Amino acid sequence: MNSIRRKLLAALLATLVGALAAGGYGTYRSARGETDKLFDYQLRQIALGLRDQAFGFAVPPAVPDDQDFDFVIQVWDREGLRLYLSRPHSVLPNRAQLGWSTVDTGAATWRVFAMQASGQVIQVAQPMAVREALAARAALHAVAPYILLLPLVGGVVWVIVGRGLAPLARLARAVEAKSPAALVPLAERDAPQEALPLVRALNDLLLRLGAAMDAQRAFIADAAHELRTPLAALQLQAQLLARAADPAQRAEALSELQQGLQRVAHLVQQLLTLAREEPQAPQRTFEPVDLGALAGGAVAELLALAEARGIDLGVAAAAQDALVAGDADALRTLAGCLIDNAVRYTPAGGRVDVSVGRDAAAVWLMVQDSGPGIAPHERERVFDRFYRGADAGAGGSGLGLAIARAIAERHGARIKLGDAPGGGLELRVEFPPAVPAAG
């Protein structure tokens, strides 16, 4: 488990233990230096205390010779004859170097002081192991209080870290308390400085989530409202079909019922298409798409509808290198929505021209019709879901241009509305090109 508390505690305790170890080592070195000075002083004082003693008698002078006495004393005369050795079994050199020296005999290491006085050479030695043991004992006595306090310090660190992380726990509880019905932003005033970026990011997420849920609720409400009317009409047409008295009335009622079913199926298909174009919906991988060929296919699919309405529908121009990066199925839906919208709102005997081209900055798809057009003050609203202009009549669901804009935005394209040369509406969709324009 990736725990901030555990990481902080481990880091702080490791730092404390490291500091304690460094302090202990420093204390040991300091204690070693002090004991070296003290014992060197003692070696010299013992040697000075023996300089007036005579070691040539049968009975040597009184020199401590018990096991608790850590020092070893040797005395030579002028000819190098050893007159005295306090511990006969001690292994020390048979020659003395005047002054201070450290001697390794193989069995032990000794600190030695030798001086010459009254025709004699006096040597006093002490094992280094004794000094090291005393230095370690002194260091342990100095560090022992810190070692004993370490559990207490660990407990204090645990409490401090817990209190330091308490705002994060409160923040987690505040986020957990949020519900889809109440996505109120978190209060930034009580948030610690380190958690403020997280709080702001969460608030931004809550705002976007609230807006998305509001849009979803509005979409569901609008869809239910739009489906209510055609479903009621279908129910009425089914009743008329059931009450038809002769074959002619039955055939007419059946035809109206089939047309109503087609309108409902078309509306449901548009709703599903719009849902697939929502930002949170899974998106397909973009690939190079030939916009000219795609527009030609969309025109071919709608030729029957155009002929039935007496509309002259065709491709006016199509560039050969109009490649865009996108989802081919979604782009086909976009082209179909624009062309279908133009065919449905162009009166009989009118004209709808589709063209595809490219320039240095963009690849574009343009649909021009000879219909009534859209008033300038309504051109932004026609992209709203279920919006139908004042001159739209009873046909259409008001979803075609909303679907087209959603697809265009997902592909980084822009839809521009203008006046066509024939007096109708001009729809121009500009895409970023998939490949650079040729020189």
Image (tube, grey):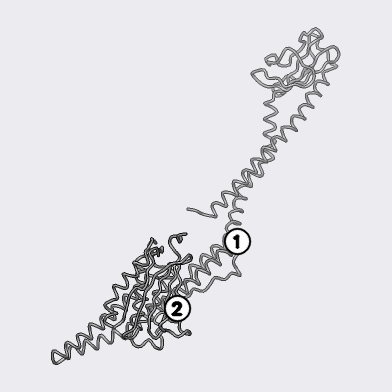
Front-most of residues 265 and 201: 265
Instruction: Give the vertical position of 41 relative to 253 (above or below).
Output: above
> Percent x, y for residue 414?
46, 72
Image-quadrant location for residue 96: top right
> Percent x, y for residue 104?
68, 19
Query: Within 10 Å of the Cα at label 2, are there few (<14), some (14-19), or many (20+) other Cα atoms?
Result: some
> Percent x, y for residue 68?
70, 24
Q: CA distance from mark 2 to mark 1?
A: 48 Å
Q: Amino acid at mark 1?
A: Glu
Q: Residue at x 63, y 46 (%)?
A: 16
Query: For numbered disc 1, what is the local secondary structure?
Result: helix
Q: Nearer the viewer, mark 2 or mark 1?
A: 2
Query: Within 10 Å of the Cα at label 1, are there few (<14), some (14-19), or many (20+) other Cα atoms?
Result: few
Front-most of residues 70 and 153: 153
271 with respect to 245 (left or right): right
Image-quadrant location for residue 122: top right
Tag 1 residue = 194
Instruction: Give the vertical position of 148 relative to 300 (above or below).
Output: above
> Percent x, y for residue 402?
40, 77
Tag 2 residue = 417
Query: For numbered disc 2, what is the local secondary structure?
Result: strand
Q: Amino acid at mark 2?
A: Leu
Label number found at residue 67: none
Front-most of residues 231 and 402: 402
168 with respect to 292 (left or right): right
